[in-house]
Amino acid sequence: MKTIITLLFISILTITQSKAQILHPVTWSYAAKKTSPTEAVVLLKATIEKGWHIYSQNVKEGGPVATTFTFAPSKEFSLVGKTAEPKPLTRMEKVFAMEVSYFENAAIFQQKIRLKKGQTTVAGKLSFMTCNDEKCLPPDDVEFSIPVK
């Protein structure tokens, strides 16, 4: 019995330790604001821990994974143009042997929509890759659902 309890304790400790090592240097938050009765802007904000960065939507082939936004089709709204991003920083990254555009600290992406009804929910998925000066984490996909009232 003592052996079973010891093994159980070691298993729980191992699981706890492995979960503590998973890095999540980027968190996402969402909002929407109506600009008129028939238009709104959906805001997708990345908050990035110090020392980390995510990449622009505009990355050349052979570079890191670009940040992308995929919006679920809806009969209640239509997208107006492409998702806008703030002005990124640009630097040469040895790992990719090219100049890349990226964001540090925070970045707010904006998507204009045309409403067909007064209220809706904008759903979709975003994909991004985050790196620091030592390593890159695998690309991550995050689903979102943003009410527009």
Image (tube, rainbow, N blue to C red):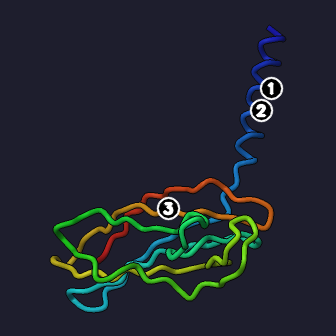
**Proximity of marks 1 and 2: CB atoms separated by less than 8 Å:** yes
Marks 3 and 1, the one that precedes in the sequence: 1
**Vertical relation: 35 (above or below) 63:** below
| Residue 109 location (% of width, % of height) | 48, 79
User: How far apart are the two marked residues, 3 and 2, measured between alpha carbons?
Assistant: 30 Å
In the rendered image, the residue lying farthest to the top is 1
Q: Secondary structure at mark 3?
A: strand
Type of amino acid under label 1: Ile
Res 127 label: 3
Front residue of 6/109: it is 109
Q: Residue at x 31, y 75 (%)?
A: 148
Q: Residue at x 50, y 56 (%)?
A: 141
Quadrant in which the N terminus is drawn: top right
| Residue 139 location (% of width, % of height) | 57, 56
**Vertical relation: 51 (above or below) 40:** above
Q: Secondary structure at mark 2?
A: helix
Res 14 label: 2
Q: Secondary structure at mark 1?
A: helix
User: How far apart are the two marked residues, 1 and 2, measured between alpha carbons?
Assistant: 6 Å
Front residue of 132/107: it is 132
Callout 3 environment at 10 Å: few (<14), some (14 to 19), or many (20+)? some
Task: Find residue 61 and report its image quarter.
Answer: bottom right
Q: Nearer the viewer, mark 3 or mark 2?
A: 3
Front residue of 122/63: it is 63
Type of amino acid under label 2: Thr
Q: Which residue is mark 1?
A: 10
